[in-house]
Image: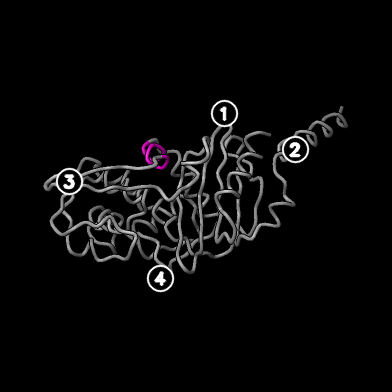
Amino acid sequence: MIKKLITLCLTCSVTLMAGIDKNELNKLEVEALLVKDMTTKQMLYSKEPFKEVQPASLTKVMTVMLAIEYGSLKKPITITREMTKVEPTIAGYRRGDVILMEDLIKAAMIKSDNDAAKAIAITVGGSEEKFVEMMNTKARTIGMSHTHFTNPCGYDTKGHYSTPKDLMKMAEYAIKNRKFNEISKMNEHRYRAINKNREFYAYTHNRLLNRYQYAVGIKTGYTAKAGPCLIARAKKDGKDCVIVMMNAKGDRWKTAKNIFEQVLNS
């Protein structure tokens, strides 16, 4: 009986891991890579989970989650000069524009607009500094023990860092939120300043959303130090998979799609 149970357990283990070709993943030119089955909560592949990395615009997952949880989505936000003092990517707001909080959230997530992220921070936190404190408090609360934020956008500033494992924890926390999931899978968003005849257009940098039918988010990122990075999620027939990929030297979209195909079709 015991022998049969051991054989059954081993068979189940092999079946669960059968969809991942670890040898191929080991050959990928990525600084770090995590693949997690969100249905079984099993980590299918892990490379450098504890390495300190620059999170780039993956940071904005935390920024928008705080906006969703603590901000009023229908609140009109008057853009100040301070909110526009950011580096590209930007929506191009001008001082005096009035933008709904929900539109700022979508702009920060979909197009990764830094003026939108900064406007969120100043509005929700009262100041950018206070908002960063909120980010770090939330990080500790959800178990991101090796993360420290210094800004809401993801700039490569001193002391702004995370680990792939912590970024996975952040993603797992975020996808529990219905509104976050709704926004993170959007390809584009058109909106207007509610006090002026000015239209803005947010389009996604996440090519998976345009090319892979099972992709449902989450966030892309890039800076000179971080390189191309990605938190991606795909769902099919009750299967759910999340990938954290940092500093990908090759085609991150092709890599992510190939991983999803292995997991979702196994």
Q: Nearer the viewer, mark 2 or mark 1?
A: 1
Mark closest to the chain's N terminus, 4 or 1: 4
Looking at the image, do the residues carrying marks 4 and 2 touch, with CB atoms under 8 Å apart? no
Mark closest to the chain's N terminus, 4 or 2: 2
- Within 10 Å of the Cα at label 3, are there few (<14), some (14-19), or many (20+) other Cα atoms? some
Q: What residue would you read off at disc 3? A: 76
Q: State the extent of the magenta-drawn residues as a range.
A: 179-185
**Which circle marks residue 238 in the picture?**
1
Left or right? Give the position of 246 relative to 265. Answer: left
Q: Residue at x 80, y 31 (%)?
A: 8
The kind of secondary structure element at disc 1 is loop
Principal secondary structure, stretch drawn in magenta? helix
Mark closest to the chain's N terminus, 3 or 2: 2
Q: What residue would you read off at disc 4? A: 157
Image coords of residue 55 (percent x, y)? 47, 60
- Within 10 Å of the Cα at label 2, are there few (<14), some (14-19), or many (20+) other Cα atoms? few
Name the amino acid, label 3.
Pro
The kind of secondary structure element at disc 2 is helix
Q: What residue would you read off at disc 2? A: 13
Name the amino acid, label 2.
Ser
- CA gap between label 4 and label 3 equals 30 Å
Image coords of residue 254 (percent x, y)? 58, 48
The quarter of the rendered structure image containing the N terminus is top right
The quarter of the rendered structure image containing the C terminus is top right
